[in-house]
């Protein structure tokens, strides 16, 4: 288990938590670490995914962000939801631009290896992560997409050359009661058309993360790191 404490950070444009890797020495200004930027789902918050760090590789630097849109007390979104499953193109583009700016801040602030910088999303966070990969593939090393989808009707301008060969792992529950399995299959087929290096896994689970699905993600990360 990662014994490094989780720290709250308000110094950048998106409120976030950080957890530095095992063996991190703040006096070492040269070492750069593989990193994960975790994006929570609809109506959740920055504490939702940071706990996954206990079950994954201990050499990762974690950043877990809080969506900038208030949904309810303690609950946030990455963009204003106007229609389930079909984000408004203008609103989505603005959300992706904000993520892009935040990544610039992260790379300038923390000892992150930009060649091993991954997005990890759950549900809405997966949708944002895959949309970011498709439109700005040069900015990240790959994506962990859990229980999400690609908003194919939201005007994404896919960087076809840049996205080819980019590694992605998608996990989705056969019994997902919140995000239709059909959407996941359609998203899988959509990104495969662009030559993404995809590992796709379904599990017997609802709209959640299990030890089995997390094990598949850990195995995938081993290959990337």
Image (cartoon, rainbow, N blue to C red):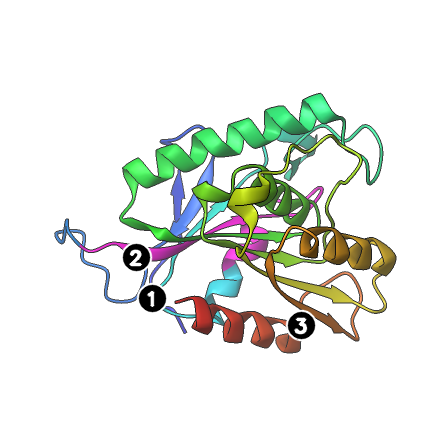
| Mark 3 to mark 1 CA distance (whole Å) | 22 Å
Labels 2 & 1 near each other (Cβ < 8 A): yes
- Of callouts 3 and 1, the N-terminal one: 1
180 relative position to 172: left or right: right
Q: Closest to the observer: 67 or 167?
A: 167
- Of callouts 3 and 2, the N-terminal one: 2
Q: Give me the residue at 56% from left, 69% from top.
A: 217
Q: Quadrant of residue 25?
A: bottom left
| Mark 2 to mark 1 CA distance (whole Å) | 7 Å
Label placed on residue 210: 3
Q: Give me the residue at 84% from left, 32% from top.
A: 83
22 relative position to 93: left or right: left
Picture coordinates of residue 60 (x, y %)? 37, 61
Q: Give me the residue at 47% from left, 35% from top.
A: 15
**On screen, residue 52 above or below 121:** below
Q: Closest to the observer: 2 or 207?
A: 207
Q: Closest to the observer: 40 or 130?
A: 130
Residue underneath mark 2: 33
Picture coordinates of residue 99 (x, y %)? 51, 34
The image shows a total of numbered marks equal to 3
Screen quadrant of the C terminus:
bottom left
What is the span of residues highlighted in magenta in the rendered image?
31-50
Residue underneath mark 1: 59
């Amino acid at each position: 288990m990662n014994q490094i404490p989780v720290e709250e950070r308000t110094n950048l444009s998106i409120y976030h938590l950080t957890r530095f890797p095992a063996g991190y020495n703040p006096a070492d200004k040269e070492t750069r670490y593989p990193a994960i930027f975790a994006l929570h789902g609809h109506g959740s918050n920055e504490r939702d995914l940071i706990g996954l760090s206990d079950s994954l590789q201990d050499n990762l630097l974690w950043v877990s962000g809080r969506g900038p849109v208030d949904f309810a007390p303690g609950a946030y979104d990455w963009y204003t939801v106007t229609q389930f499953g079909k984000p408004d193109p203008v609103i989505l583009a603005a959300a992706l631009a904000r993520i892009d700016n935040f990544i610039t801040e992260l790379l300038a602030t923390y000892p992150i290896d930009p060649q091993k910088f991954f997005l990890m999303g759950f549900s809405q966070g997966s949708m944002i992560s895959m949309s970011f990969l498709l439109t700005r593939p040069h900015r990240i090393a790959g994506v962990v997409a859990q229980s999400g989808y690609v908003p194919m009707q939201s005007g994404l301008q896919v960087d076809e050359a840049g996205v080819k060969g980019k590694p992605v792992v998608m996990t989705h529950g056969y019994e997902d009661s919140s995000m239709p399995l059909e959407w996941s299959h359609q998203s899988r087929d959509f990104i495969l058309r662009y030559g993404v290096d995809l590992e796709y896994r379904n599990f017997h689970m609802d709209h959640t993360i299990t030890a089995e699905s997390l094990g598949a993600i850990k195995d995938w990360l081993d290959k990337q790191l």
